[in-house]
Image (tube, grey):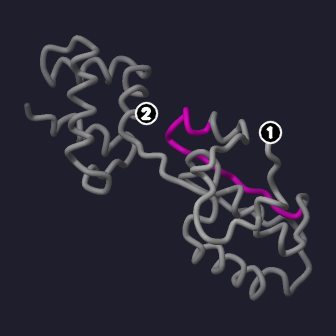
Amino acid sequence: MNVLPVLELLRQKIGLNPESIGSASVEKSILEHMKISGSANVDDYLKKINDSPAELKKLVESVVISETSFFRNRVPFITLKNYLKQFVLNKKLERPIRIHCVPCSTGEEPYSIAMVLFDMNITANQFYIYAGDISEQALQLGKSGVYSPYSFRGDNLDFRKTYFSNQ
């Protein structure tokens, strides 16, 4: 079955590039949702997702990948620290530092950014992190602030002692 029209709709609505996450898995999700929704064909399913924001939301949640962990890739955090030292912290802060973090998934990236800033002795009232994601499920998990061991991967996990508690 040719699901290209649905792929194009996802590209237009959320900027999805199916090749970036695997076209086969995206197509599988589309076909599963078509079946669940009772759609007879692609045109019928397109009508459903165009008429129902809830149906589109279900499809989006099934195709996005929330792969994340604290300090998953150290290079951007080192770059942020160097940038702040060179261009921001060498002068008087007249307004809070604003950082936009998208996609933020379940929050590990923006929380990692906050830890970098705190480690640089930047206080909470000196910065603001705007974080967003297309996945409302991921955002809800991030708001809870509760993380599994999977979020803590890598060799340097010293930050856990300072910023997290075991409960």
Mark whose residue sits in front, 2 or 1: 1
**Rendering quarter of residue 81:** bottom right
**Crowd tier of the residue under label 1, counting other residues whose Cα lies within 10 Å: few below 14, some 14–19, many 20 or above:** few
Q: Which residue is mark 1?
A: 167
Question: Vertically, is 5 above or below 119?
Answer: above
- Residues shaded magenta: 126-139
Camera-nearest residue between 40 and 112: 112
Dot 1 amino acid type: Gln
Element at badge 2? Answer: helix
Report crowding for label 2: few under 14, some 14 to 19, many 20 or more residues within 10 A (C-alpha). Answer: some
Is 137 on the left or on the right of 99, as rendered? left
The residue depicted at 41 percent of the width and 42 percent of the height is 64
Q: Amino acid at mark 2?
A: Glu
Residue 136 lies within the magenta run? yes
Residue 6 in picture, x, y percent from top left: 23, 34
For the C terminus, the quadrant is: top right
Is residue 124 depicted above or below 93 in this figure?
above
Asked whether 72 falls inside the magenta stretch, the response is: no
Q: Quadrant of residue 96?
A: bottom right
Q: Position of residue 110 (x, y in %)?
A: 67, 56
Nearer-N-terminus badge (2/1): 2
Q: Please, is residue 17 above or below residue 154 in the view?
A: above
Label 1 residue SS:
loop
Is 146 in front, or is 53?
Answer: 146
Asked whether, in this view, residue 105 is left or right of residue 130, the answer is: left
Please give the residue where the numbered disc 2 appears in the rendered image.
Answer: 61
**Residue 54, position as x, y percentages in the image:** 43, 20
